[in-house]
Amino acid sequence: MADGSLLTTDVAIVGAGPAGIAAAVAAANRGASAVLLDSAPRPGGQIWRHRSAAELPASAARWLQRLRHSTVTWIPSATVVGMHRARALLAEREGREFSVRWRRLIIATGATERFLPFPGWTLPGVLGVGGLQAMLKSGAEVVGRRVVLAGSGPLLLPVAAALARAGARVAVVAEQAPAARVYGFAAGLVRTPGRLAQAAAYRSAFLGARYRCGTWVVRIDAAGAGLVVSLTDGRRVWTELADLAGVGYGLVPSVGLAHLAGCEISDGCVATDRLQRTSVPDIYCAGEPTGIAGADSAIAQGTVAGTAAGMASGPAEGAPARRAGTALASTRGFAARLSRAFGLRPEMHALADASTIVCRCEDVRLGRIDRGWTMRQTRLYTRAGMGPCQGRVCGPALEFVTGKPADSPRLPLFPTPVATLAAGPPPSEGDT
């Protein structure tokens, strides 16, 4: 792809996870030209990250096959860093900038893992739960290594199961949510037998490990080549030895591109209607940016958005869209129950002390931040959120710890060569 090249398409889809793949396939099935972009070298997103198709569950493999057999133009390793006003995405691939002009845009940018700073969270061997999962899927060797998992949310279960199957010694899985909420949520899974069976299969894979509710990490210390993980249930504190620790507190919707486009954001999620339309004309959103609800919901939302966006005028119609709409309605209750069950307890606000680094990129400690500052003042005075991660790691953490709303995203959304930003907007459609 040459520098400054311009692609034009009926529908552009940003993000190739379950929602983006379903949206791209649905749009192409309606006869629209579709371009699908993702920063990863393979489609699938974090949840379907893989090295070979044999590693994927059958449903994921079917969707990837549909994508391969469709007319969708797939552009891997492409990072969307912003938008031009003339309905065009600004992107970068292998150090070269290019633009994608769209008639309709579907944002399917997924979610990022939420980290909450605590003493020791920056030590070698301490990772996010999702980060540990990504390493495992990329071929990391964990045989015989002792692992402690902690945090909150259903992701703890599949990661613990995958680690155990890969030969790791999972010592304990610590869920901060109280047992009453967790087991109440599990009981509600009888409405969705498939999810219940899946959860049971995950738990059976690491039966040798303890699963403790109402338990969380208070600090981690280095001990020789390993780690000492201090856990508490609010009454007592004890330690666990580990080679690796995965600590993550659920997922946060990735709304940066939608925010930059001017879409309405409500309670941290992109607001959409029943056809997944945002508040901005011709921009749709599907999957986790609209709320964390799992792959089934993302696929249903993507199908609805792609079907609607793939039509030049008017609403989504046809059997696939109706089936997706029915599936989507059934997942909304699940998302609400998920949020209630794994909501963060008040003690999580006090995990970090004054000496705890809260911005890893810029080495900013909590003690340097005045609680009276706005988030923008925090950025200006300390550079917190202005490093390579552009606030994707520390932004949600600071928002949670300080109670201050996040600052508005700015171009570029991701680090990119200056040449990408120096390139002017593409010519208007009438000039081409």
Image (cartoon, rainbow, N blue to C red):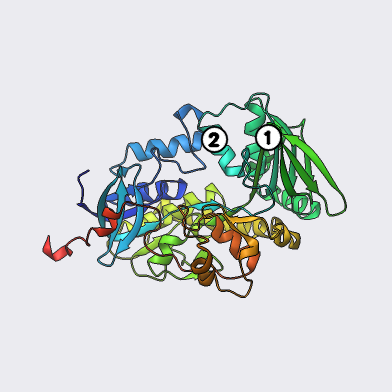
Q: Amino acid at mark 1?
A: Ala
Residue that label 1 marks: 201
- Binning the other alpha carbons within 10 Å of mark 2 as few (below 14), some (14 to 19) or many (20 upward) gives few
Please say whether residue 292 is visible from this viewpoint: no
Circles 2 and 1, Cβ within 8 Å, touching? The answer is no
Q: Amino acid at mark 2?
A: Met
Q: Nearer the viewer, residue 225 or 285?
A: 225
Residue 327 position, x and y percent, is 53, 53
Q: Secondary structure at mark 2?
A: helix
Q: Identify the residue at horizontal 32%, vertical 37% (top origin).
A: 69
Q: Nearer the viewer, mark 2 or mark 1?
A: 2
Q: Nearer the viewer, residue 169 or 367?
A: 367
Q: Identify the residue at horizontal 30%, vertical 55% (top origin).
A: 418
Residue farthest right in this picture? 235
**Count of numbered circles in the view:** 2
Residue that label 2 marks: 135
Mark 2 and mark 1: span between their CA atoms? 22 Å
Residue 85 position, x and y percent, is 28, 67
As drawn, 170 above or below 383: above
- Binning the other alpha carbons within 10 Å of mark 1 as few (below 14), some (14 to 19) or many (20 upward) gives some
As drawn, 228 above or below 19: above
Residue 2 horizontal side relative to residue 79, left or right: left
Residue 193 horizontal side relative to residue 171, left or right: left
